[in-house]
Each structure stands twice: as structure tokens, then as C-alpha cells.
Image: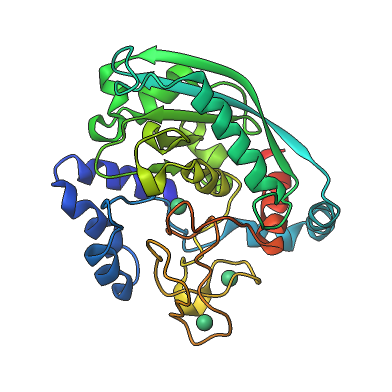
Amino acid sequence: MSFKRILLAAAAASVLVVGFVPMAHAARLDAAVCIERHDHPGPEGRVRDLVEAPKVDRLQGWIAKHPKLAARAEAAAAVGDTITIQTYVHVIRRDLTVEGGNIPDRWIRNQMTVLNRSFSGATGGAATGFQFELAGTTRTTNAKWFTVFATGTDKAMKSALKVGGLDTLNIYTANLGHNLLGWAYLAQDAEQVGALDGVVVHYQSLPGGNFEIYSEGDTATHEVGHWLDLFHTFDGGCRRGDFVDDTAPEASPAFDCPVGRDTCAAAGLDPITNFMDYSQDSCMFEFTPGQAVRMQQAWTAFRA
Ligand SMILES: [Ca+2]
Ligand SMILES: [Ca+2]
Ligand SMILES: [Zn+2]
């Protein structure tokens, strides 16, 4: 289960030096992935997240069991019916400065705009049928939660702050540490992980932040993609893929913006412009129609 792996990673990371974290993560993926991730984790050495595809995709099981509901969700994706997801943003800060995590409301509004543009197809991809409405913002001063990954306080933070049920999106902003941009739990694990369900992003990844190539708000878009059950485009490598037909298979994550990259013999260049790759924010701008279908089906299966 992906959530177990995240917990494992969190436990391991507390005793590992920063540079080793991507390697520890990569070690659980294909051996071929290891080298590239370790050698080239992006110019700032940042890692998008710690979400990994589970060995068994529960969504496939659900589709087999519920063909009519699955077909209905697929049709909804095609006609662009809109589901508006109530979204709470929880700002964790060390103090009242922006550097201390106390990000301005403007950043949060701009992040919501980025989410809505990304998921509506306005940036170039498919209209997914999902929109997001800011239902509330909380601000919490807690130095331990601020470095949530390093201090292993994910559960305490979320248990105290999480609002709503499976259909409510909770986004936490903090100073993740260990070069992480964010993490999320898959829709198919949401019920099982309970309070942990939600999206955590580095506060500097929001539009206005100082992460340069990772400060256009696409970390949240990527994590919300996971929250709606998308895997990485490189998960499953060349052979199994990401359970989405219209994303070309990819052997390993792409960093920066390697135009023309082609790591799998199967037709199609690597989907480096997809929100679910690891490329820089300015390079990723689309979800595919197949990802829209998967998200709609996962919504019906696990969140609606
Ligand atoms: Ca694919
Ligand atoms: Ca190819
Ligand atoms: Zn990811």
C-alpha cells in the first residue's frame, strides 16, 4: 500500500541525511530509475513527492465490479460535467513572517486559480470536470508541524486540522524539509488512511514562493492529481505503465524540461508536459482525457 510506504519513508528519512532521501525512495522503484533520480534530482535537488503506485490498482478492481458506474463516470468526463470540490487550506507557520510559513492570502487565491485552470484544461490539457472552491483557510503556529516531514508530525497535524469527509480536499502548507515539494494519499487509500488523507505542499511551491522553477503552484496540481488517484506517468515503467492509455509509457521521472525525451520503445515521446511527471512547473501543463476518465471513476469509486 502506498500509505505504508510513505510512513516507512518518513521513518527512514528522520535518520538519513538529505541527499540520501531520493536514493532511498528510488531504491523501492525499478533499479533503472535509481541512477537517474540520484544523479539528477532537479537543479535545486528537490523531489516532487513520495507517492508510489501500489502493486495492485484497486481502481481496476472497482471498474470490473461496477461496469455501469464506471461507464457513467467515463461519460461524465467526456461531456465535462463539473464537480466542485470544497477545499480547505491549512497554513502551518513557525512565526508570523512569510519565511516562517505565514504565506499571504494572495498566494492561496493564486494557488486556487492555478488548480482551477489546470483541471479545466485552460493551460492546454483536457478538461477534467473538477473545480475547486476555497471553503476556508486556517493558520496554525506550530514549529514542530512546520517541519512536518522532519518531525514526523503528519498525523498529529492532520488529526487536529482536517475538515470534512472523503470528498473534501485538505491542503496543508509547511516547510517539508528533506528537499520534498509535497506528498499526498491516493483516492483508493483514502478511507483506509483516515485522517491522513489530504495533500501537503511546501509553502514556497505556491505561486509567489521562492523555489523558482517549482513556484508556479503545480506541486499542488500534481498532488491533487494523486488525491484523485492518478499515478505518476513513469510509474510502472515501460512495461506496465500508469493505467492510463493516452499517456505514453516512460521509464523514469523527467526533471527540468527535457524536450524530445524518449525512454520507452513504445510509441510516443515521454509525457514530460504532463502534471504527473517530475518536470519543472513551466514544463508541465496538462492532464490527458484518459487521466480525466480515471479521476472521474476514482471520484465515484472512492470519494463521492
Ligand atoms: Ca500510460
Ligand atoms: Ca516512447
Ligand atoms: Zn507525485
Residue at image point 30% right, 50% down: 46
Q: Picture quarter containing residue 82?
A: top right
Q: Residue furthest bottom?
A: 265
Residue at image point 49% right, 58% down: 283
| Residue 247 at x, y percent in the picture | 60, 69
| Residue 260 at x, y percent in the picture | 48, 77
Is 300 drawn above or below residue 156 in the view shown? below
| Left or right of residue 154, residue 287 in this image | right
Name the quarter showing ligand 1: bottom right
Residue 224 visible, this angle: yes
In the picture, which quadrant includes the C terminus? top right
| Left or right of residue 256, residue 12 in this image | left
Residue at image point 82% right, 57% down: 78
Q: How many marks?
A: 0
Q: Nearer the viewer, residue 92 or 115?
A: 115
| Left or right of residue 75, residue 219 in this image | left
Q: Nearer the viewer, residue 249 or 240?
A: 249
Is 208 drawn above or below residue 102 in the view shown? below
Q: Picture quarter containing residue 24?
A: bottom left
Residue 1 visible, this angle: no
| Residue 206 at x, y percent in the picture | 45, 35
